[in-house]
Image (tube, grey):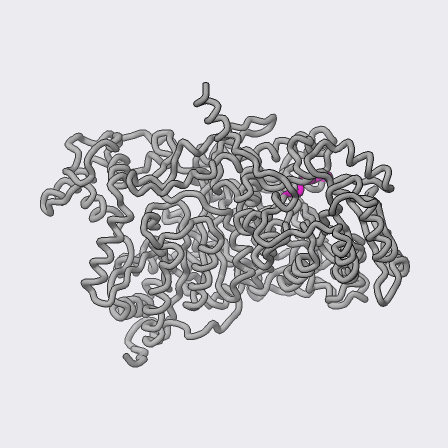
Amino acid sequence: MTRTDPLDVPRPHAQFHFGVFFQGVNHWTIWSAPDSGSQIDPASFRKVAQTAERGLFDAFFLGEGLRLREVDGEIHDLDVAGRPDAITQLAALAAVTRRIGLVSTSNSTFNEPADLARRLSGLDLLSEGRAGWNVVTTDNAWTGANFRRGGYLDHADRYRRAEEFLTVARALWDGWDDKAVADSADAPAWSAPGAVRRVRHQGPQFDLDLAPTLPRSAQGHPVIFQAGDSGEGRDFAARNADVIFSAHGNDFDDALAFAEDIRNRLRAVGRPDDDLRILPGTEIILGATEEEAQEKKRWIRLQQVTPATALGIAGLLWGIDLSDRDADGPLPEEDPVVAENDGSFGARRIADPREVVAEWRAKAQAHRWSLRETVIALGPQRGHVGTPSALADKFAHFVRHGAVDGFNVTPYLIPDGLDDIVDLLVPELQERGVYRTEYTGTTLRDHLGLREPLTHRSAPARAHAS
Amino acid sequence: MPGPALHLAVEIDGDGSHPAAWRRAAHSPGQLLTPRRVARVAAVAENAGFTLITLDDGVLPPGAAPDPVARIGAVERAAFVAASTSTVGIAPVVPVTYAEPFHVSSQLASLDHISGGRAGWLVTEEERPEAARAWGRPPVTGTDARARASRDGVEVARALWDSWEDDAVIRSVATSRYLDRERLHYIDFTGESYAVKGPAIVPRPPQGQLVVLGEPDRVPAAQLDVALVAGRDLAAVAWAAAAAGTPRVFAEVEVALDTPDATAAERVADLERHAPWTDRGRLRHIGSGDRLVALLGELSRHVDGVRLHPLVLDEDLPVLSRLVLPALSERRHLARPLPGTSLRSTLGLERPANRFAAAAVQEEAR
């Protein structure tokens, strides 16, 4: 294959970006295979981050959970669970990586701005400008039971709090003038007089007054990620985020529609429509031939959706305990029970389970699927399956048409699940001219080709207040 | 005669324990906040044979103009240092006066995983009202209320560390179960101002419980593994050590040492032109390395270890590294940590049984 830049596409020179999502709680990471590694050993994190860096990825990404999941009041025991605190783990990875971005998912509902902004600044300085923050919110009292505030915030309030949180965090990050620190020990003072400004904030969510303790990093601010898909979430991203981590990356038309929607929202708030990177989460399954890739996918799905997991997923849909049924038998004959949401993760919001079950029955009958096969076939369709060459063509098409800017890849195996992507797929993307052949910058903001932080664009020279 | 071998700890926050230490530092002021600087100081301390490094912290700036007002969070620095060292113990200072105990517990447990069991926690307090304004929380005023906040915070963190039994991850292919939920526990902590349900999100740390250090009049002795005791002279330190009631006791000692370029007294005098060396009621040694060796020998009859607070890290750490620790070592008087050993075992402390597992066994035995 020779490099070509087709010019009859909307973005002929678009570049593809990869992040890697080291998942915490989930059933997609296969833990039962002989080469399934530890989910907590620092060596696992190091291996994944260093492999991603070898593959010139933009970012290493960690999720967050603030309470162990439960189903019907009991701790859910089928999923991978147990993980380190994200910022702490990423600070360690800053010492053993050189270029890759380090993105922490951190909750704005159960953190306080002075503390979290400072922790993120510390990560940003220790990594010399490679930190990112995936801003998430929580609305349930069940998670709140682990925190001082307890209680919960309703859906709208949690975004209001997130937005005010970001405002305060940015004020803290902007609280130091560049070159505030003396360049010699003979200077009259360590920091120039007036170069550090107190942040006094009084709002509906926060009332605080403090002196920020850190200067800006090489990239200005940590890069802001956002992952909510609701209308409020998308508007929040349009106003605040540098990167959106969506679930719209499987199907080209769906991805493009999502991207167009985000671009419209960006224009509506007065931002350039190329101001935000769209990196859907995905899984990538590679094979030397199409058949081999499909065979591998079947194996992976059976490892991910064990009989017990299939019964658990179906149980949530039906609203009844199905754990004593045969997953390899037919679908339950009962009608689903519409459960009240008790605030825990056990009761998911499903529009109308009766409709979903009717659809499942029809398809299972037509294909002679067992319950487990039905769960696999009709559950969320994840990722891209194929040969490295075919997927490289597909991804080049996605990015050149503006449907995505890249993917945040979830490896199905830890710690070696990225190896074939880095060794086989990345070179194909490079040949097509859609993937970097070396890091050209040092910061996460550089890698993603982002502009200056939102609060720091062509800012007029500010007076040294207070 | 000196007592048994001593464990040495060193506080490596900022440029040293003198507020104006930055004026004698070997780097330019801004370099203080670079990863290279953080890693280098830790590497020097590790190579010298220190058992433990501590990293001071708090939400407020570490000093006031004209001295440094910047500091990277201690947990973040500790994690970074843990990944670039292999033997030395690492204890960040984390006050829980206003912080979320659930987060603090997770961060520290993670540090223990990252360091392979070399983590400690130095519990302090946010004493000044400005700290409450920074957090946006109602002020915790008075010695008793702050001590209560520390006690509750340590209790929550310790209970959460036990909320996963050591073998809670079972990976049972036969039953599809990753976890054994019988080995996970709600802590159901209820204090005066908050409650915490649990369990933790981080599996039990490698040491079972991190080594918890603190001042015995701030944190109940029963919650401490190591008491940090101060006193202006040997007698005061000896008295405080005898009264501590904790498994291990470390004395706080501030040091300014003679260097090839200047005597300790000259160096102190130079910095005193800018600001006084804050008096915290600690034993202070200003003089030669040899005399410090003798002082440490005296102290070893009363305490298990000493935490040193060098006047200027860039000047005193090399003297400690080239003269003081080797001299102690030669006299078989320095307890050096061994690679692959947890901080707890270096200090001769047992790995604690899990409180919930122990309870389950008792239940069965009834």
Residue under the point 50% across and 64% down: A444
In the rendered image, the vertical position of residue B273 relative to residue A306, given as above or below: below
| Quadrant in the picture for residue A278 | bottom left
In the rendered image, the vertical position of residue A445 relative to residue B125, given as above or below: below
**Relative image position of residue A364 (x, y in whole percent):** 13, 43
Q: Nearer the viewer, residue A232 or A143?
A: A143
Please provide the residue range marked out in magenta.
B121-129
Q: Nearer the viewer, residue B282 or A396?
A: B282
Q: Is residue A207 magenta?
A: no
Q: Is residue B127 magenta?
A: yes
Q: Is residue A336 left or right of residue A455?
A: left
Q: Nearer the viewer, residue A380 or B180?
A: B180
**Relative image position of residue B250 (x, y in whole percent):** 74, 42
Residue under the point 52% across and 58% down: A93
Q: Is residue B85 left or right of residue A340?
A: right
**Relative image position of residue A302 (x, y in whole percent):** 24, 49
| Quadrant in the picture for residue B40 | bottom right
> Which residue extends farthest top?
B366
